[in-house]
């Protein structure tokens, strides 16, 4: 008998629910008995594993967050606790697992696969877009649109008061959110961790803008670059305009998933079940060049192998002048 469990782990992201729904529906149609695990690996350890009925996933496609709840579990990193977790699956006869989360969650999934032979597939769910092997992660597009909405509102004040406003956005070690927001929102400056960001260069660009008659500036600062208040302080020595900073924070993580994220979630879920049906496991699904692809979880660890963003950075600089 084929029994499959679904869990969400790590930071929540819009689109996770759409992925849960599609995974459950498609798995069921392929003859799997479908289980849900609450609170990620923590719940697997504590045996919060339940038979998922069709009703559980109805009406959730447009909801942010994750109805399965998410948590972090330090214990799960230890072999003796993983054994307990794996046994909780085994005693219910569950031998398939879909993990929706980030690269930390994949490391845990890969260990379950290697140590206990549980057939796992990962679905990349994080707003940060920081996972190797996929052009987009679930939640990134929704988050980007939330940031764009905030930028428009913040720009009203920046314009009216002729200020320079720094907006710190999420992304962990990745600059994708800041970069895309700068390009799509008409940002006037950008700082991301992947690139060298001398404060002098930003200052020069902002001074040049004012010289050209621009009366305000919006600068996107990725959290990976450091605290925006430190950057504000440094910038003060270089430019004369009034500077303010805003940390967007958790509003970026929530909200109704965009159409793009819902379609992506559904396609990723379909690919995940297709992979398991083909007898493959120990992989993550992704989207590359608009094709659904898989990569071994072993390869996902390395963030250095991520896609190049240099072209987009050049474009952002060009358009923000
Ligand atoms: P994300 O999946 O968003 O990257 P985390 O890095 O917090 O989030 O990872 C989520 C969970 O995955 C952790 O709380 C832990 O239970 C599990 N995990 C992370 N790294 C490992 C690891 N090296 N070994 C086993 N489990 C891990």
Image (tube, grey):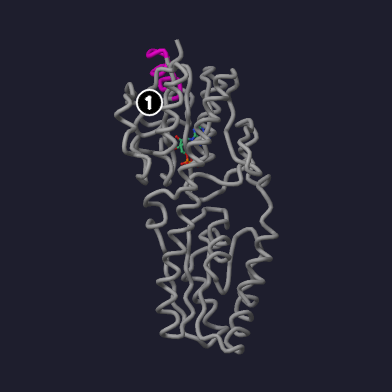
Residue toward you, 220 or 60: 60
* Residue at the (43%, 46%) spot, across then down: 13
In the rendered image, the vertical position of residue 63 relative to residue 235, given as above or below: above
Q: Is residue 54 left or right of residue 280?
A: left
Q: Is residue 59 left or right of residue 138?
A: left
Give percent across and percent down for residue 149: 42, 64
Give whichever of 30, 239 is nearer the camera: 30
Residue 24 in percent (x, y) is at 41, 27
Residue 188: quadrant of the picture:
bottom right
Magenta residues, dominant SS class:
helix
The answer to whether mark 1 is within 8 Å of ligand 1 is no
Q: Quadrant of the N terminus?
A: top left
Pointer 1 residue = 45
The residue lying at 41 percent from left, 22 percent from top is 85
Region of the chain picked out in magenta, as a range: 82-93
- Tell whether 283 sits left or right of 142: right
């Amino acid at each position: 008998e084929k029994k499959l469990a679904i869990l969400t782990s790590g930071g929540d992201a819009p689109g996770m629910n759409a992925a849960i729904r599609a995974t459950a529906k498609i798995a069921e149609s392929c003859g799997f008995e479908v289980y849900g695990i609450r609170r990620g690996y923590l719940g697997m350890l504590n045996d919060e594993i339940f038979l998922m009925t069709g009703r559980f996933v109805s009406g959730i496609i447009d909801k942010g967050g994750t109805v399965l709840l998410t948590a972090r579990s330090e214990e799960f990193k230890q072999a003796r606790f993983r054994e307990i977790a794996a046994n909780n699956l085994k005693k219910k006869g569950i031998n398939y697992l879909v993990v929706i989360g980030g690269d930390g969650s994949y490391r845990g999934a890969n260990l379950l696969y290697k140590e206990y032979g549980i057939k796992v597939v990962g679905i990349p769910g994080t707003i940060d877009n920081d996972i190797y092997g996929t052009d987009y992660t679930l939640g990134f597009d929704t988050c980007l649109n939330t940031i764009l909405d905030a930028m428009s509102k913040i720009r009203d004040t920046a314009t009216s008061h002729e200020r320079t406003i720094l907006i710190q956005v999420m992304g962990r070690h990745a600059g994708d959110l800041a970069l895309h927001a700068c390009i799509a929102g008409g940002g006037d400056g950008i700082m991301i961790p992947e690139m060298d960001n001398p404060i002098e260069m930003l200052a020069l660009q902002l001074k040049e803008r004012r010289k050209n008659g621009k009366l305000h500036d919006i600068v996107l600062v990725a959290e990976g670059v450091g605290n925006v208040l430190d950057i504000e302080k440094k910038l003060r020595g270089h430019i004369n305009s009034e500077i303010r900073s805003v940390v967007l924070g958790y509003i970026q993580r929530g909200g109704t998933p965009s159409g793009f994220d819902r379609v992506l979630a559904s396609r990723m879920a379909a690919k995940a079940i297709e992979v398991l049906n083909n007898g493959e496991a120990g992989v993550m699904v992704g989207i590359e060049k608009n094709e659904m692809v898989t990569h071994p979880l072993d390869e996902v660890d390395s963030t250095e192998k991520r896609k190049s963003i240099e072209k987009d950075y050049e474009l952002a600089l060009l358009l923000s002048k």
